[in-house]
Image (cartoon, rainbow, N blue to C red):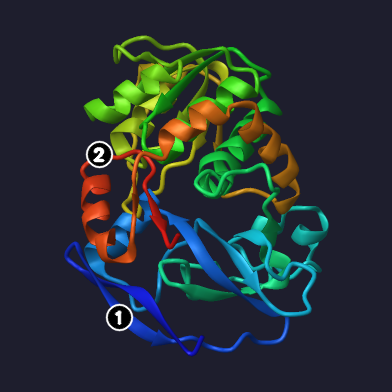
Amino acid sequence: MNRMRAAIFEGAGKISVGEREAPEPQAGEVRLAVASCALCGSDLRLFREGASWIPGHEIMGRVEAPGHALDGRRALVYIPVFCGACARCRAGDTHLCETDPDLIGWNRPGGYAEALNVPERCLLPVPDDIPDALAPLLLDVIGTTAHAVRLARKLVSGGRALVLGAGPIGLGAILSARALGFSALTVSEPQHYRRELAISLGAAPWDGEAGGFDLVLESSGRAEARQAAIEKVAPGGVVVLLGESGTPWPFTENRKIRRKDFWMLRSFYFPIGDYQANLALLRADLGAYRRLVDRTCGLEELGDCFSAFASGKLAKPLLSFA
């Protein structure tokens, strides 16, 4: 493959399709023919502002590397390009690598294209029993949220949980929290479609007043949601910031938080060593995860798919080259 089709994020909500030269893999890399790439809320900024690179970071494809042990096999792309040798990598925190800043789909080409080159150590083989459409959920929807809940469980073992924002990460957080010991789940989501989907997954709608939650997973990135999180967490509880925001977050230290001890965590992605445990979470609840993937589209329809996703009418759409 010398030429490939790729999405061009022009900005202002416009995505076109163009041809790019398919670069040859460098030492330590293999080519991956993209089968699917899930849309992510963090890509909405690129949808609105444009990107000079090929975005897309929730990628599943098939390895094209004759002679390689994974040639012809399905694989996911672990997006942090880690060195494997720094102190953080040696401790197992590959997502926090100290020496390699690359993130696939962010500062090197990603999966909204027919192919990309992937460092060999960033390939996660997909077992035969995992359906194509669900494999990308093992990255952000399961990997990111389960890592956040596991961090929180070092401080609180279970109890009542509130999820603020029911986008893809919030929906994944509901399922991860339920699977990892938080039996009473509540959700706040203003958009009707996503709120009803969250409720169907077992979360009760939040009335905006109830508090005392042992765990609050803030997945919207909105300043008012973060304020609500620290006001509604129980004494001794944990707030985890999952949602991304590029704007300052001023918060009010009012009487609801002043005389209260609580923990606040920031969680990013997941260590590669979590992969087998995350596979177990997916296998245990395939029916629920299937409900999240509510549309697939081709490259030419990607712009329309992003528009519907941005308006909250879709939960976890998928670009598919099948």
Rendering quarter of residue 62:
bottom right
Q: Earlier in the sequence, mark 2 or mark 1?
A: 1
Quadrant the C terminus occupies? bottom left
> Do we see residue 267 in this rendering?
no
Residue position for label 1: 18
Q: CA distance from mark 2 to mark 1?
A: 27 Å
Q: Position of residue 277 (x, y in %)?
A: 73, 38
Q: Is residue 176 left or right of residue 218?
A: right
Q: Which label sits in the foreground, 2 or 1? A: 1
Amino acid type of the residue that numbered disc 1 sits on in the rendered structure = Gly
Q: Mark 2, residues whose alpha carbon is within 10 Å: few (<14), some, or many (≥20)? A: some
Q: Position of residue 287 (x, y in %)?
A: 52, 27
Q: Is residue 146 left or right of residue 82?
A: left
Q: Position of residue 103 (x, y in %)?
A: 54, 67
Q: Is residue 160 above or below residue 227?
A: above
Q: Is residue 79 left or right of residue 109?
A: right
Q: Is residue 145 above or below residue 136?
A: above
Q: Residue at x 50, y 33 (%)?
A: 289
